[in-house]
């Protein structure tokens, strides 16, 4: 396909962006990456179109070239395109460098064996160091512009393969003093310094003069991948991360560099910090994170180097900058922040959380930072949000919630208020205007707003979220809890349509609140019987809060309500309450009500339902009822309400069809006794199985019906349970047994499973003749032999022998049935075939690959089976 | 410290999707790292369609408020920051930074350089502040000096190129997109070594500095014995310095008259090079006394090219500029209202605008009105149930004005009259809007003679001042009103 025009590309890129996965799955999907690369070199396309192609590749290189070979080829092609660009300045150079970097990283192609990597890295380093790379990379002035881009690309490569640039540390160190933009070079140096220090401290090596090695090769020698590979081998990539609890316990690895390295390191860090104000705020923040966490593990590197920057940074309240100061705080603690400094930082944070000049997302983030503040001497458990010790009520004054705030601000501030109240150990008695009193005011306001008829759901949600927050933080504050419960009861009275919110709240809160709240809500719900719009909500509420113990009021409410339940939905709601009562105890009144409903309800479904509940109530013990109607395991979505009945109910009362819980295998046969016995091994697979009953069915009724087998208990991991199955053949023939298992699970459910069928082989039916007195064997055999004819048949069969020979074959398969043996020439074998047949074999002198067998049987029907059996012996 | 993706979504209520993605950008190299860092807990960044749906649902911006949906309305799903977990394709994408401003949703997913389960605290994720900063930067760029929709459209079309400058590989280089725009436009200028990264290019032309101080005053007046009125002044000092040279140094001092109110809670622009500790510690948290630092407040800095906010402050002035009282009572079917305003004598009696909005929420349209105003005119918006009292440029000599009247309301129409969840029953407020030029409540001013400039040429210095009201409420004293904690303190 020739190069597409601008229009066509615009359309194609638009279609791709709309849904990359759909586009790639489509007809054109496969070609996109290839077309894009080739059209970059087309002279017909404008630079603007090529820019849009490259922008797309930057964004979706992982989709366009998903695997390493494709990414490698793409990066090579991009680098070729770069070389082929005409000398004049072009916007494409920067993008091509970025695109090649992105392709290599996202396609996982970066590495010593990748040709494109080995071309890109020296090129980037050359550009970054400000060397003139010749006219093929544009004019010298353009090359200087590319210096920043090269630093950014190198930085990205280093981030994805830490240690990659460790060898270039010395060279990078010399850059900030020379020409070129300050920010890219500083950031790159800080990043490489961080990675190198972290990898060195983890591996226990020193800096080994990396900081002062000036003459780094950029092209004439192969790239040094050792540190990057060392990192790969030992560690995951490491961002400048907050300390985790585990890390603290293990002790952060500490590196002790040589005095010379220490001096150099100090100078490098000081230089970076001194010029840091020239960086954009976001870049300054990155620099501080990197340097802070790099120096954290170093002995003899006092963090005082950072001190001169702090006042300037604290003055700004800029989000990224203050966040980076907090990261320094977390990294160094008391070593960098005295108690006064800590207090100042907290004050600035408090200020940032409410300053009118800052936007709300910033306020909220600062508020979070206050509650996760890295204190010098934390008291509470780690990882839990808490108000820092230094944050007294005075500091928090401006951070109190008000109904005028938007929901998120309100919740965040309410949380802080709760924490303050929780700290206030002594419950306020006569103080009418303390934090607790204010908290109750806020809650009352929220409840009042939620009660507004027709108000948006968001207001109700906010009220319940606030209630949840308060109960979680203030479990032991009885005054708050009491007033909260009272307020919620009022809210329900005013707006019963919030029932789903109440049900959700009851599900979430701790038992200390749940029980009193449940009781209050029950009273509220039953207090207003009769016809009303709220009936369906009251019923929904009762289904949650009704319990057997307080049945009488509930029952009279239901009785009154039943008259007004005119549609299917209300019937169902009513029955759900009955069901809740059934679950928690049932009772006489309930039986009457159910009977009444079974007669009176208008639709058949409802009547059936009521009747079913009545039957359950009158037939099941209360514990079984509780289990039968317990919470469902999965919500069935069926149309009929009877069918839609809770799965817990059906599973407890009905047999569940499941996959096989046990493994059944046929064990070695024991040919003895009057009848053949099938020896089985039973093992539980994943879960214990109780009261197992195995039922067998013989295919074709070849044997008498088999008795079911019972096993009390099987547990996984226990040795196989042996099982002897007495077979009573009606004719001597192999058969298939179908097996079904009926069992109980540990949850008390009864289950049914079909197991794979078992095969009873012909040989499984073999039984020996009784033991004969010594000397009489030959005569006995001859008598049998003669008795077979004329009723039976005689035949000769060639039995092939494997490498093991005749003797081994006989001892392995026919030993119990040998009447007389004269090895190696003759074996006389007599086999009983229940119910009333026999098989006699004369094995004659073995030849090279087999043995001729003369056989007689009184049942001609077994002849083909015998043939198959004998011919199959060697194959075993 | 990097971002996995950025989105800009226009919220369009009433449309089938509820919004459209106006811009999105993904960073595959960062995604690669996310996969390694997050390990088993990694959730890929979804395509635009599913992301849009999940985000609008989470932000409650879909019009399906009718039913209770546990995933959104459940009481334990507390959101206390602008950072969300979105349910996408059965998995939870977290953390997603998102906020809505002027019907635009700004969203971004920062890289978390560790496993996501258990969730690490947000404070430990450097990408959170970086992502928020970028989104706020985009918002600033889109809405600063934006005049109309065409403007916005132009700016939106510039975003892909700007992000290529400001965040080419997912690591944010500059959140100030105006600066990135300058850098695209000045690509041929060679940067000298010591040039700050936040200042691309150099100014050529006549030297001039403009300093404008804008103060806004917020107020809550209750007219009650047991609830204290509250008010607060917040100031912003905006600067534009047109000076030649790479790093011209400027020092601006803010001064107060002898009876001025000290500036507090000062936050400065990052270009300010040093800060007096008295400036850093003066805070509204402390109780005021005479020993409070009252200036001059010196700010030495190197200015960026564009206009910028040198500093913000707050202050506690002794009295609110306009004292008001509002009585509203229901008498039968009628509503009786009495309003009084008194301008404080110290305030400059020369308004650009001064008007009082008197809304009547949760009622029907105004069907009948009789009133008497001692001053100014009253505009009546019957359908909106709103009165606007236009006070004009000056208060009369007595400095006191009043309005009284009776109103009756019709039957509440469906969605025609405004709903408010604060103004329930007789809870009601008046909102005062006013603007006074060449005046600050604190008295704060920039002394032109004290501006020090270390650059070639003597600049022309101009200074402006302005006072604007914002959230200036007078509550009906005859009904409960939403109180703040501060107004309850003795």
Image (cartoon, rainbow, N blue to C red):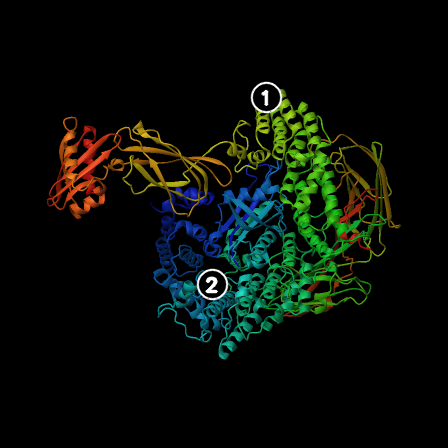
Q: Label 2: state its secondary structure.
A: helix
Mark 1 lies on residue: A603
Q: Answer few, some or many: residues within 10 Å of disc 2's Cα (few below 14, many 20 plus, some between 14 and 19).
A: many
Residue A314, given in percent of the width and then of the height, sits at 65, 65
Residue B119 falls left or right of residue A688? right
Q: Label 1: state its secondary structure.
A: loop
Is residue A608 visible to us here? yes
Residue A632, given in percent of the width and then of the height, sits at 54, 36
- Residue shown at the point (46%, 45%) measured from the top left: A17
Q: Is residue A392 placed above or below B474 in the rendered structure?
A: below
Circle 2 chain: A
Q: Are marks 2 and 1 on the same chain?
A: yes
Question: Could you give the CA–CA distance between mark 2 and mark 1, rounded to whole angstroms?
Answer: 73 Å
Mark 2 lies on residue: A155
The residue closer to the viewer here, A596 or A406, is A596
Residue B264, given in percent of the width and then of the height, sits at 74, 62
């Amino acid at each position: 396909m020739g190069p597409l025009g601008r229009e066509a590309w615009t359309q194609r890129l638009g279609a791709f962006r709309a849904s990359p996965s759909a586009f790639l799955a489509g007809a054109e999907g496969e070609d996109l990456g290839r077309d894009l690369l080739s059209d970059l070199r087309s002279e017909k396309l404008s630079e603007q179109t090529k820019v849009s192609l490259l922008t797309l590749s930057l964004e979706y290189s992982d989709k366009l070239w998903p695997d390493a070979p494709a990414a490698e080829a793409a990066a090579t092609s991009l680098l070729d395109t770069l070389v082929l660009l005409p000398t004049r300045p072009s916007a494409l150079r920067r993008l091509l460098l970025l695109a090649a970097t992105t392709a290599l990283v996202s396609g996982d192609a970066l590495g010593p064996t990748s040709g494109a990597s080995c071309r890109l890295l020296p090129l980037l380093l050359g550009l970054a160091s400000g060397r003139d790379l010749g006219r093929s990379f544009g004019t010298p002035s353009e090359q200087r512009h590319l210096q920043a881009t090269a630093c950014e690309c190198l930085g990205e490569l280093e981030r994805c393969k830490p240690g990659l640039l460790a060898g270039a540390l010395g060279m990078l160190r010399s850059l900030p003093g020379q020409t070129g933009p300050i920010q890219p070079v500083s950031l790159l140096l800080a990043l490489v310094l961080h990675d190198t220090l972290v990898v060195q401290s983890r591996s226990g090596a020193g800096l080994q003069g990396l900081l002062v090695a000036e003459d780094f090769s950029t092209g004439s020698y192969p790239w040094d991948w050792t540190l990057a590979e060392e990192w790969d081998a030992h560690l995951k990539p490491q961002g400048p991360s907050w300390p985790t609890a585990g890390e603290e316990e293990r002790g952060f690895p500490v590196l002790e560099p040589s005095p010379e390295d220490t001096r150099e390191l100090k100078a490098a860090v000081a230089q970076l910090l001194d010029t840091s104000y020239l960086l954009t705020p976001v870049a300054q923040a990155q620099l501080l994170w990197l340097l802070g966490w790099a120096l954290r593990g170093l002995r003899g590197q006092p963090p005082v180097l950072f001190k001169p920057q702090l006042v300037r940074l604290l003055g700004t309240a800029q989000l990224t900058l203050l966040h980076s100061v907090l990261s320094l705080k977390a990294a160094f603690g008391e070593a960098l922040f005295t108690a006064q400094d800590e207090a100042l930082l907290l004050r600035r944070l408090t200020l940032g959380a409410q300053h009118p000049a800052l936007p709300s997302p910033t306020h909220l983030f600062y508020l979070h930072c206050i509650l996760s503040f890295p204190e010098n001497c934390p008291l509470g458990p780690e990882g839990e949000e808490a108000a820092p010790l230094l944050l007294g009520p005075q500091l928090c004054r401006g951070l109190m919630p008000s109904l005028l705030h938007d929901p998120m601000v309100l919740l965040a501030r309410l949380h802080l208020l709760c924490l303050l109240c929780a700290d206030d150990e002594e419950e306020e008695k006569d103080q009418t205007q303390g934090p607790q009193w204010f908290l109750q005011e806020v809650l009352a306001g929220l409840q009042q707003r939620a009660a507004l008829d027709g108000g948006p759901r968001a207001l109700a949600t906010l009220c319940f979220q606030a209630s949840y927050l308060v109960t979680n933080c203030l479990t032991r504050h009885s005054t708050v809890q009491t007033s909260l419960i009272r307020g919620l009861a009022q809210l329900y009275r005013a707006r019963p349509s919030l029932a789903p919110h109440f049900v959700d709240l009851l599900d979430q809160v701790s038992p200390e609140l749940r029980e009193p709240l449940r009781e209050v809500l029950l009273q509220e719900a039953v207090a207003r019987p009769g016809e009303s719009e709220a009936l369906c909500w009251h019923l929904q509420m009762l289904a949650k809060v009704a319990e057997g113990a307080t049945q009488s009021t509930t029952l009279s409410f239901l009785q009154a309500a039943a008259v007004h339940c005119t549609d299917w939905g209300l019937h169902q709601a009513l029955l759900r309450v009955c069901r809740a009562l059934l679950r928690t105890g049932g009772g006489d009144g309930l039986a009457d009500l159910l009977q009444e409903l079974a007669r009176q309800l208008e639709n058949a479904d409802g009547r059936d339902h009521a009747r079913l509940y009545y039957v359950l109530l009158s037939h099941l013990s209360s514990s079984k009822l509780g289990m039968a109607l317990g919470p469902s395991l999965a919500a069935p979505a069926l149309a009929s309400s009877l069918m839609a009945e809770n799965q817990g109910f059906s599973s407890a009362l009905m047999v569940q069809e499941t996959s096989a819980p046990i493994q059944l295998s046929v064990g070695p046969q024991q040919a003895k006794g009057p009848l053949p016995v099938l020896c089985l091994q039973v093992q539980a697979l994943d879960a214990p199985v109780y009261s197992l009953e195995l039922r067998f069915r013989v295919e074709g009724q070849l044997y008498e019906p088999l008795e079911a087998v019972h096993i009390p208990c099987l547990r996984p991991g226990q040795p196989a349970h042996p099982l002897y199955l007495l077979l009573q053949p009606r004719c001597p023939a192999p058969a298939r047994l179908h097996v079904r298992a009926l069992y109980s699970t540990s949850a008390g459910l009864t289950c049914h499973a079909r197991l794979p069928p078992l095969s009873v082989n012909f040989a499984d039916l073999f039984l020996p003749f009784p033991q004969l007195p010594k000397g009489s064997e030959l005569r006995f055999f001859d008598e049998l032999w003669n008795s077979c004819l004329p009723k039976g048949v005689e035949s000769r069969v060639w039995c092939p022998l494997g490498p093991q020979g005749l003797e081994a074959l006989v001892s392995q398969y026919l030993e119990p049935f040998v009447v007389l043996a004269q090895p190696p020439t003759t074996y006389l074998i007599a086999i009983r075939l229940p119910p009333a047949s026999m098989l006699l074999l004369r094995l004659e002198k073995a030849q090279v690959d087999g043995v001729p067998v003369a056989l007689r049987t009184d049942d001609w029907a077994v002849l083909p089976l015998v043939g198959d059996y004998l011919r199959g012996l060697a194959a075993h | 410290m990097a971002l996995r993706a950025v989105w800009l979504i226009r919220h369009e209520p009433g449309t089938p999707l509820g919004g459209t993605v106006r811009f999105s950008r993904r960073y595959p190299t960062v995604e690669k790292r996310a996969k390694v860092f997050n390990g088993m807990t990694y959730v890929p960044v979804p395509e635009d369609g599913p992301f849009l749906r999940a985000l609008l649902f989470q932000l409650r911006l879909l019009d399906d408020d009718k039913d209770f949906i546990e995933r959104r309305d459940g009481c334990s799903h507390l959101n206390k920051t602008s950072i969300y977990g979105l349910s996408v394709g059965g998995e939870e994408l977290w953390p997603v930074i998102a906020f809505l401003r002027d019907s635009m949703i700004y969203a971004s997913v920062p890289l978390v350089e560790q496993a996501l389960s258990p969730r690490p605290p947000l404070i430990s994720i450097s990408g959170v502040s970086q992502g928020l900063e970028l989104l706020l930067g985009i918002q600033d760029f889109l809405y600063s000096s934006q005049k109309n929709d065409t403007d916005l459209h132009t700016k939106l079309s510039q975003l892909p190129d700007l992000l290529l400058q400001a965040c080419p590989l997912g690591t944010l280089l500059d959140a100030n997109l105006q600066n990135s725009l300058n850098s695209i436009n000045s690509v041929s200028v060679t940067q000298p070594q010591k040039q700050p990264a936040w200042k691309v290019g150099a100014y050529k032309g006549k030297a001039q500095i403009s300093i404008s101080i804008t103060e806004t005053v917020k107020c809550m007046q209750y007219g009650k014995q047991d609830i204290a009125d509250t008010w607060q002044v917040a100031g912003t000092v905006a600067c534009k310095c047109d000076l030649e040279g790479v790093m011209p140094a400027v020092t601006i001092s803010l001064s107060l008259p002898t009876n001025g109110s000290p500036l507090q809670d000062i936050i400065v622009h990052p270009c300010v090079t040093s800060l007096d500790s008295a400036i850093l510690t003066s805070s509204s948290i402390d109780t005021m006394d005479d020993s409070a630092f009252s200036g001059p407040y010196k700010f030495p800095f190197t200015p960026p090219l564009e206009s910028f906010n040198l500093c913000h402050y707050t202050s506690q002035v002794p009295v609110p500029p306009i004292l008001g009282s509002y009585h509203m009572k229901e008498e039968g079917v009628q509503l009786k209202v009495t309003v009084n305003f008194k301008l404080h004598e110290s305030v400059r009696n020369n308004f650009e605008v001064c008007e009082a909005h008197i809304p009547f929420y949760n009622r029907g349209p105004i069907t009948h009105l009789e009133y008497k105003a001692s001053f100014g005119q009253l505009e009546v918006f019957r359908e909106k149930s709103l009165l606007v009292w236009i006070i004009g440029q000056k208060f009369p000599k007595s400095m006191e004005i009043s309005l009284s009247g009776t109103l009756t309301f019709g039957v509440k129409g469906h969605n025609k009259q405004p709903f408010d969840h604060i103004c329930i029953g007789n809870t009601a407020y008046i909102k005062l809007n006013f603007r006074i030029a060449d005046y600050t409540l604190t008295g704060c001013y920039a002394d032109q003679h004290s501006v020090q400039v270390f650059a070639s040429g003597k600049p022309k210095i101009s200074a402006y001042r302005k006072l604007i009201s914002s959230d200036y409420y007078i509550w009906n004293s005859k009904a409960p009103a939403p109180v703040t904690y501060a107004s309850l303190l003795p």
